[in-house]
Amino acid sequence: MNPIESPPSMHPCKKICDITGYEAPYSDPRTNLRYANAEVFKLIRSLPNEYVQRYLAQRNAAVVLK
């Protein structure tokens, strides 16, 4: 069966860490960035708002943060 002819997947899409590219079980409620572990969370919290917006724009999730 050609992949184009296949039905859509019934499994949910995996969430990927915005910083590392690993699977991300967590999401920061303040920035809405996804992260893989505590070390990445600390990095996310130290990022300037401009960088956060760039990461969100990469996955088409850009929002105006307050």
Image (cartoon, rainbow, N blue to C red):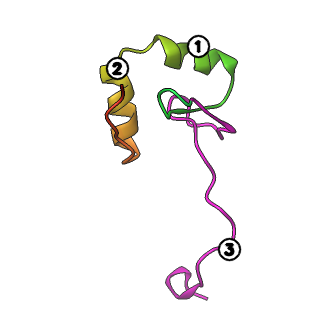
Residue furthest front in the image:
66
The image quarter in which residue 56 lies: top left
Which label was assigned to residue 10?
A: 3
The image quarter in which residue 20 lies: top right
**Residue density around tag 1, few if under 14, some if 14–19, many if 20 or more, within 10 Å:** few
Q: Amino acid at mark 2?
A: Asn
Q: Amino acid at mark 3?
A: Met
Which label was assigned to residue 63?
A: none
Q: Please state the horizontal and vertical placement of residue 37, each as a whole percent of the image.
A: 69, 24
Q: Amino acid at mark 1?
A: Lys
Residue 21 is a magenta residue: yes
First to last magenta residue range: 1-28
Between discs 2 and 1, the one toward the N terminus: 1
CB atoms of marks 2 and 1 within 8 Å: no
Q: Is residue 41 left or right of residue 53?
A: right
Callout 1: SS = helix
Which label was assigned to residue 42?
A: 1
Callout 3: SS = loop
Please name the residue that numbered disc 2 is placed on. Answer: 49
Q: Is residue 58 left or right of residue 1?
A: left
**Residue density around tag 3, few if under 14, some if 14–19, many if 20 or more, within 10 Å:** few
Residue drawn 58% across and 13% down?
A: 42
Q: Which one is in front in this view, the residue at disc 3 or the one at disc 2?
A: 2
Between discs 3 and 2, the one toward the N terminus: 3
**Residue density around tag 2, few if under 14, some if 14–19, many if 20 or more, within 10 Å:** some
